[in-house]
Image (cartoon, rainbow, N blue to C red):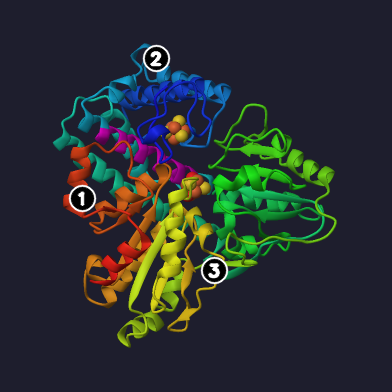
Amino acid sequence: MFCFQCEQTGGGTGCTGCAGVCGKSETAAALQDILTGALVNLAAVCPDETPSPTLSRLLLRSLFATITNVDFNPQTLQAHIDEVHALLKTYGGSPAQDFSLQEIWHAQEDIRSLKSLLLFGIRGMSAYAYHALMLGRSNAEVNSFLCKGLAALQASLSVEELLPLVMEAGKVNLTCMAMLDEANTGTYGKPEPATVSLTIEKGPFIVVTGHDLKDLELLLKQTEGTGVSVYTHGEMLPAHAYPELKKYPHLKGNFGTAWQNQQKEFDAIPGALLFTTNCLMPPRPSYADRVFTTEAVSYQGTVHIDDRKDFTPVIQKALALGGYAEPQHFTGINGGTSVVTGFGHDAVLSVADTVIDAVKQGKIRRFFLVGGCDGARPGRNYYTEFVKKTPADSLILTLACGKFRFNDLDLGTVGGLPRLLDMGQCNDAYSAIKVALALADAFHCGVNDLPLSLVLSWYEQKAVCILLTLLYLGIQNIYLGPTLPAFLSPHILSYLVEQYHISPISTPEADLKKILAH
Ligand code: FS2
Ligand code: SF4
């Protein structure tokens, strides 16, 4: 196998051999490559400028299955391949013409680098587009670009031809995140700041993880009146901020921290576990029978809730387990007993005048966006230390699962606002962009002229598409870690450094010193 799409890739260069660091088997990796090659073929023969709803849905769901920590199951991957081939034949295509990803893996290193950036960006964007689709939203620009981008993977293109396509992926992903933002807020209301308890109350319960708000809503409806409580985990935490989700009294609190701690955190809890998206780790035998998957997530041997969305097996499991006899007071990584979320763009911009005044009066000296994915690498402590060391007159925006390293810290207030504002999931990077653009507007300057620094952590392909969006917007001086993507060739990396001044993170002290000197 060969895979180098995520940050924890083997040896910092690529996973090879019989399994990836994530636990993906050689068979699953090969099937994901075959599935991607079949999608490239399908995208290339598809005659429509605007792909049909059937084609778009299949593209999104299949690409989602190739993202890190989503689908480990050869059976479901083969089913996706069969479905793609069936549709391909209706367009007059032939599976014999499927693209081989080996052509990318063995291409000249800059071509390999740019085609990988494009492919991984497309995979990440597909996940966001799929969530929006689940809420009834679809966008022709996004769907067309996915076909165009996939088809480009098999074309013989130069570095000069591929670079604009990679930037176009960033542009289209902005549209995609805007669509998902509208889908989430249009369906569930504007997020409102909410304090979320980390205690699990007594009685049966279900822990829901991943990013899919629709699945959470359906589960909340089906658990009404059953005596089963629901707790969020990981990227589902921001659900507590949405009026149409927090109205359910049995949505009680949040359990656990970020995805890489799940094997330890899920080991002994007497509750059922529902995975709606990444990041699924291979379940340990001690809790595998409590794991349920849905949508694109799949793991051999665990029960999958299909598109009919009957969550009865999950509810039955929770009832059979019974939960705790007494409330269990869990804490975050730093010992906090609750966390605060819900500072989406509407909430932050509703206090824009306060923020602007505080900046003008010198009460807020700097804004930081410390956000992105979490992961297992020890170097990720950087982000906790960085946040702890930020000056008291700075305001920190955060989002995605990396925040669990510091979101239970009490950082106090600045200019009448909490110093740490959680904007939501990774896709809520859209909120951060909106706030940055609004601040730039208020101060009559460009985003790069604001006293704003982006200190980002990446792990999987959604982070790749968000990074491409930030580059498309011309945002400079991003600090990126914990390591740089293995798929960036030295030449492409130096291009990004020259054009966008991306810096790898060093130490919190050194980076803060550099940032605050400006
Ligand atoms: Fe975290 Fe994993 Fe959100 Fe990523 S839960 S690393 O997929 O998308 O951030
Ligand atoms: Fe390795 Fe990451 Fe690919 Fe898994 S997704 S096989 S850890 S590079």
Under 8 Å from ligand 1: the CB of mark 3?
no
Q: Which residue type carries mark 3?
A: Leu
Q: Report x, y in % for residue 194.
A: 59, 69
Q: Residue at x 71, y 42 (%)?
A: 311
The stretch in magenta equals: 113-132
Q: Which residue type carries mark 2?
A: Pro
Q: Nearer the viewer, residue 290 or 189?
A: 290
Disc 1 to disc 3: CB gap under 8 Å:
no
Q: Which residue type carries mark 1?
A: Val
* Left or right of 105 in this view: 195: right
Q: Nearer the viewer, residue 238 or 176?
A: 238
Q: Secondary structure at mark 3?
A: loop
- Residue that label 3 marks: 409
Q: Residue at x 33, y 74 (%)?
A: 366
Q: Is residue 27 above or below residue 368?
A: above
Magenta segment includes 115: yes
Mark toward the start of the polypeptide (3 vs 2)? 2
- Residue that label 1 marks: 497
* Left or right of 54 in this view: 238: right
- The residue mark sitting in front, 1 or 2, is 1
Mark toward the start of the polypeptide (1 vs 3)? 3
Q: Residue at x 18, y 39 (%)?
A: 491
Q: Report x, y in % for residue 401.
A: 50, 53
